[in-house]
Image (spheres, rainbow, N blue to C red):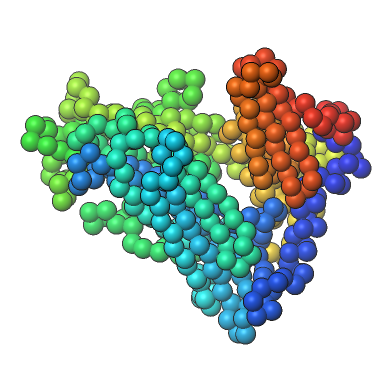
Amino acid sequence: MSIVSRSDRESLVIRYGLVVLLMIISAPAIISGGAHPEQRGVDIIGAPRFLSDYAVFSSPTPSMNMVEIYIRIPLRSLYTVMEGQKDFSEYEMAILVRDNDGKQVTGMSWKNRLENPGLEKFDHNRSSSILERKYLELPKDKYTIEIILTDQVSNLRWKNEINLNLKGYESPMLISDIEFTLGDISQATIVQQEFLRHGQSVVPSASRTFDSERDNPGYYLEIYPNKNSPDIFGIRSRIFDLDGTLVYSDSNSIGMESKVEGVIPFFGKLLISNLAPKRYQLKLEVGDRELNKIYATRNAEFNIDWSLKTLVENDYGRAVDQLRYVASPQERDSLKNMPADRRLEGVQDYWKRKDPTPTTPENELSEEYYSRLRYANNNFSGYGRPGYLTDFGRIYITYGQPEEIERHPFDLDSKPYEIWYYYRHHRKFIFIDKNGFGNYELAYPYPDGLKLD
């Protein structure tokens, strides 16, 4: 089903984004020195998106925790500008830590300028990115951490938020938090620092979403032994889906001979090749050798995202249905009727025809569409429906991230509702939770162009 008619579809933001994209690439910009910004492989809404994650470790300061923030910035998200013969990108990062009352308790900011970098590092391919790690020492409390990237060339910003509860960590800490890791550092990644822990390389993934076909993730854990600790620790790792079903279990052991600088580092593999695309919980338990006595437990959720190839091969009907917000009914019918041995080719050809920059290896429209679709599925699923079929999901996929969300969950004179504002498109959407169970439905506007066909 499609939410718009064929004529209305041409005005969708997905299509609108192509016009914006061409304007961004070709039109002059008002920047000092008359330079023109360029963004190779720009995201459709133009904001400099990035990935971020965190992990909590023991701090040398009593009653404090060491919080590590991991940031991965795709180079294709950054604008470049020419000044004379020099080509550069420049950005500013800010980390703001707010307490439960919204008051800022600490923060930091820094700038980075990439000037005439070598092509082997400044390649705007999918894997090219900047990887950074920052440290925050915080007392045990609840926090909101805002991570803000400002592109200094375009002045566009993107913000990620982390909700952090440090009250649940025991003191002294027996085991660290779970840090999700990458198997290796891509040659196309610019690493701002050495990612070493006690003499060993530990590269943070800066994300908890993994591609079942491409990624080979792992995790890192630190054990902090004391004088009463056993000579050998047992470690049990289990993966559950969010319904509580056990999908993977394994046990290992590690001894005191592995201790380095007072810490026992433990490296584990995250085996994801057979996991379906949805959210999971990794549960790690550390105890005695036989795991009869458990000393401490850590949990961390992660998400599996199938590649287009894997999705087509395993659930072709879903792969075609997910195109409902960008493909016409006729285009989807044509794909549905593809012979089995040409299905992947058919979907790939569809996106090739929509590629706004066919001379580059990236398809910006396809990547943006699936990025929005993943976000919708991760954040709006419920009541037996995947997120992309909810009203929240269909508006998010069509228009992208709202510039402002106004939430009214507890107003006395109305049912819970939200207002999403898209100032750049002069639109707003009102969603109402009619039954009070978190199932928000679009209430305004609801013209024919937004109804399901």
Q: Nearer the viewer, residue 1 or 130?
A: 130
Residue 160, given in percent of the width and then of the height, sits at 52, 46
Residue at the right extreme?
A: 7
Residue 282, given in percent of the width and then of the height, sits at 39, 31
User: Is 26 placed above or below 441 here?
Assistant: below
On the image, which quarter does residue 24 sit in?
A: bottom right
Number of residue marks: 0
Which quadrant is the N terminus positioned in? top right
Q: Residue at x 44, y 49 (%)?
A: 96
- Asked if one can make out residue 8 in the rendered structure from this viewpoint, the answer is yes
Residue at the top extreme?
A: 435
Q: Nearer the viewer, residue 267 or 36?
A: 36
Residue at the bottom extreme?
A: 84
The reply, left or right, for residue 351 in relation to residue 303 is right
The reply, left or right, for residue 431 in relation to residue 281 is right
Q: Nearer the viewer, residue 284 or 447?
A: 447
Residue 42, given in percent of the width and then of the height, sits at 66, 59
- Asked if one can make out residue 389 in the rendered structure from this viewpoint, the answer is no
The reply, left or right, for residue 141 in relation to residue 199 is right
User: Is 120 placed above or below 160 here?
Assistant: below
User: Is 326 placed above or below 281 here?
Assistant: below
Q: Residue at x 80, y 57 (%)?
A: 19
Q: Residue at x 25, y 29 (%)?
A: 296
User: Is 379 placed above or below 370 here?
Assistant: above
Which quadrant is the C terminus positioned in? top right
Q: Residue at x 77, y 69 (%)?
A: 27
Residue 133, given in percent of the width and then of the height, sits at 38, 55
The reply, left or right, for residue 342 in relation to residue 70 is right
